Each structure stands twice: as C-alpha cells, then as structure tokens.
Image (cartoon, rainbow, N blue to C red):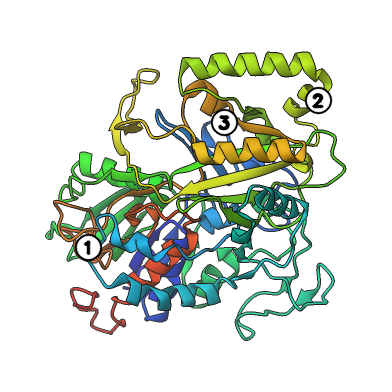
Amino acid sequence: MGDSREYDYIVIGSGFGGSVSALRLAEKGYKVAVLEMGRRWTPQNLPRSNWNLKSWLWLPFLRFRGFFSMRFFRHVVVLHGNAVGGGSITYANTLLVPPVSIWNRGSWAGLNDWQQVMPAHFKTVQKMLGVTTNKFLGPADLRLKQMADALGVGESFYPTEVGVFFGKENDPPGTIYEDPYFDGEGPQRKTCIGCGGCMVGCRHGAKNTLDLNYLYLAQKKGVEIFAETKVTQVKPLTGALDGSMGYEVTSSQGVQFKTRGVIFAASSLGTQELLLRLKEDGSLPRLSNTLGTQVRTNAESLIGVRYPGTKDDYSTGVAIGSGVYIDEHTHIEATRYPAGSNALSLITTVMTAGNPGISRIIHWFITLFKMLLLHPWRTLRTLIPYRWSQEVIIFLCMQTVDGTLTMKLKRPWYWPFMKKLTTHGPRIPTFIPAANNFAVKAAELTGGTPATSLTEIFLNIPMTAHCLGGAPMAATPDQGVVDGKQCVFGYKNMMICDGSVVSGNLGVNPSLTIAALAEHAMSFVSQATESHSETVLKS
C-alpha cells in the first residue's frame, strides 16, 4: 500500500493491548498506525500535582486535556487513563498475575488450556515491562503491615510486583542508566526516587510506562502514532461486508485511513462505546448482540485511613507498594499520591456504618456530628485537603467474587439530545463489608480515621479503577463478541485487544493480564508477505 494514509493495520488506542499489538504487528512486517485520542506526555509537560486540573483531568468539553478521566454511571464511577501509552501514564504500575482459578469461570472457560498457555505470555510481558518486586517500602506500607499483623493476617502481607526501575541495590535515587532493558534499543532511564508520583505521571524516568517500552520499540520499527486523534467511524470497504477487502477508518478531524485490519484497543469503555455506535448506525451490523454485556468492575472499592497531623509521610514510596489478603476473596493494596496532590480529597469523607441508601446517609450525618462534637479539630483536619496525600493511606480493595453489568447507548434524562453510554442491571455492591471492617478496626488500633468516598455515601455507587468486559470472549457469537483468539465474530482481520475481552473478575490489577492476552492474540497473526493474503490470521 503506497499512500501515506493506507496501512496494513490500524490500532485504535495505545494502552496495554494496543501497545503490545502495535509492536508485534510491526515485528511481523506490517505497516501499522496507532490512533490515540489522548495527548503525548513527557517529563516536561506532566503536571507537578493533580491540582493542575487542566493537565490532569480529561474533560474535553471544558478544554481540560489531561490523562485522568472520571466517568459517572448509575451503578459505578469509573476511573481510567487517556494518553499515548493509555492508562500506563496514570496507573499505579502494579503488575500482578491473577489466581489461576479465574480461567475456570466466565465465558472464556474452556476456550483454551489457559493455565497451560498463559504463563509464557505473562513472562514475556513481565520482561517487557521490567516487572520487579517493590524495593521501596514507605511508611504507608509499613503501616499496612502493622495493621495486618494486629488483625491476624500479617502472613499475607507482600511487597507488590511493579513496573518500576530501581537499579542496583546501592544506587542512589535518580541514578542514570543508558537503557537497562533492551540492549541499547530502549531509552535512557533513571532509578526511582520514591516520590509517590506514579499516578500523576512519573517526571523522573523511573516508571515503566508503555511509551518507554512497547510503543518506543514499535516506533523504531516504523509504527506511526497519531495522538489526539479520536476514531468516529470504522466500516468495511465496498464489496465485502465482512471486511475481507479491508476497512475505512475515519477520525474526528475527518481524516480517512484505509487498512486491511483493525485492532480495537481503546479500553473497555472506549471500545464498547465505539462499537455500540458502529453497530447502531449500521457500519458494523454483524457485531454480536452480546456487545455491552458481562461488564465487570473487578469487584472494587476505594476507601482509606487518614491520620490528621501525623509526622509520618504516607505519600512516599511507589503508588502501590504492598498488599494483604484479608480473606480468600478479598485483597487490599496500600495506595498513595505524591505530596501536594490532594485533589481527590474533595470527594472523600468519613466512613460510616449502615446499609446502602437513605439509612446510610443518616448514619453518616450522625457519625459526623458525633465526631465534630467530640474531636472538632481532628475531624476538620480529616475533611480538609491540606496535607491529605501525606496523611492518608488509600486502600484499593478488590475481590474475585463475580458480578456483572450491561452497557447500552441511551438518552439520559439530563441530556436527551444525544445517546450516551449508560449502565443497566442489578446494582453491584456499594462497598465491600470485609474491607470496610478491616479499615475501621485498623484505624482504631493505629489511631486513624476510616474514610470512604462521597459517591458511596450519597449516590450509593462504588468507584473502580478497573472497568472490564463488555466484549466477552466466548465460543460462539450468541455467547460473546470475540473468540478465543480475540477475533471479532462476523468480520475478517478485526480483533479486540483491551480490557473489554476480560471475561472474569481478576481480583488483582488487570494491566498485566490485558497485555498478556494481547501477546496471546498476536501470536496467531501470520508474518507479513508481499502478497498479503486475504486473511492474515493463522488458522
């Protein structure tokens, strides 16, 4: 294909699945373009704190073009990333292998001998992302260990496996290395300084974001990345409704790309929304009717414990430095933001008892009134943003217990002028009782104040940083959107490589699994040939 707007493959999105796909396709000899809605970030233009809202939040209608997005749905608040490198710019660089039991549940069960196949792909991703055991246990991690010991689960405490460059044992923070990972093919790096700034973007060259490994190497192999380019249309070229003749991809700027194959990798939310619109407008009518189903939140909640006036600095370390298992289903990680990044304090409040709904709001008012009466100064210090990130240990809580939602395009009552992505189905649990009990007891034992989110109290909805599913993997189009090779049912040379294909609650941070699944999917793509046969997928 000679035209500069013609490619063998278009990859929509540059997160964990998209970055893996771009590099592996380029290695196989294909001409590849990556279309990414978010901006390209460097240490020079990353915000110094999340109070710089225009450079932190993604709210394009306000001209805020940051990398952190909060999307409010009826059932859940979803936190996710948006940048060249996808969520890796703002994620907490925690890369854990999920329990093997997850492959035996959900619609992907039985599609492959996953327990036999996936370890090799996990190993590949771990090498590419520089996964290592956290060597920087900060005060928050030591406090979590203290809590776990006091509550009888201390033996489950562990330092996290993270994508961070620590260098050699005696290296001072900020030591410069000329590419420690890729035999001179990768960029210069610096050792971690333990500032806790991973989730507002690492400005020190220590976090192994995708633009420093998969995407970096992909670009060296000729992959073109079009930043700030939102895809609005994908349709088969005239003459083949199944896409066997290729596809036309259109961006919001009106630029048209022609390609033999398309990889959707725009995150669970992004891929679902785009595909639902394309199915509805007739561009891709063959998409399975299961699109938008089996959406999972990784059974998560975000809570914490604050220590007003403490002399310890809980902001130091890596974003997620340690974790504990408080029971066979429930996993808690100690999480932090850097000093000065206190914006999320505006949506936190004191934890309270009670069942979800109006009774919990009443309980919250009573709890807050008692706290103000008995400890007015301490309570005010608990609620104000000042020094929040240095005084709080955020608990990211996850469970392997399953539960699903459905996503649909509907006209919401507050904005009937256009259809938006909306959630449907039974309400998911607002909070995890075992995790809340752990926070309350741990706070009592260590002199802290348990905290939760305002959305949990007043809107009866949890927060999740890991929305998964929506394009389930299954044996037939009646059961899912893609097959066990992540090929879209009904279309040729069309694949989905992001969190939307994850078909079970992982119970751990999903980035490693998403990337490993993409490695697995790319292993089925044949080497490019001069003839470029009608299909490039191995049988």
Q: Which residue is mark 2?
A: 378
Residue 24 at x, y = what percent? 41, 75
Image spot of residue 536 (x, y percent): 24, 75
Q: Mark 1: which amino acid?
A: Asp
Distance in Å between CA atoms under marks 3 and 2: 36 Å
Q: From the viewer's perspective, is residue 142 above or below residue 391? A: below
Looking at the image, residue 518 sits to the left or right of residue 247; the answer is right
Which mark's residue is nearer the viewer, 3 or 2? Answer: 2
Q: Residue at x 23, y 54 (%)?
A: 481
**Residue at 82% across / 47% down in the picture?**
313
Res. 20 image quadrant: bottom left
- 1 or 3: tag closer to the N-terminus: 3
**Quadrant assignment for the N terminus:** bottom left
Looking at the image, residue 326 sits to the left or right of residue 503; the answer is right
Distance between the Cα atoms at labels 1 and 3? 39 Å
Instruction: Identify the residue position indicated by label 1 in the image.
Output: 483
In this rendering, the answer to whether 164 lies above or below 265 is below
Q: Is residue 59 visible?
A: yes
Mark 3 vs mark 2: which is more N-terminal? Answer: 3
Task: Using the image, determine if residue 21 lies above or below residue 315.
Answer: below
Tell whether 49 sits left or right of 520. Answer: right
Helix, strand or loop at label 3? It is helix
Amino acid at pointer 3: Leu
Q: Locate residue 195, reporting x and y percent.
A: 77, 55
Residue carrying label 3: 62
- Quadrant housing the C terminus: bottom left
Nearest the eye: 517 or 402? 402
Which of the two marks, 1 or 2, is nearer to us in this view?
2
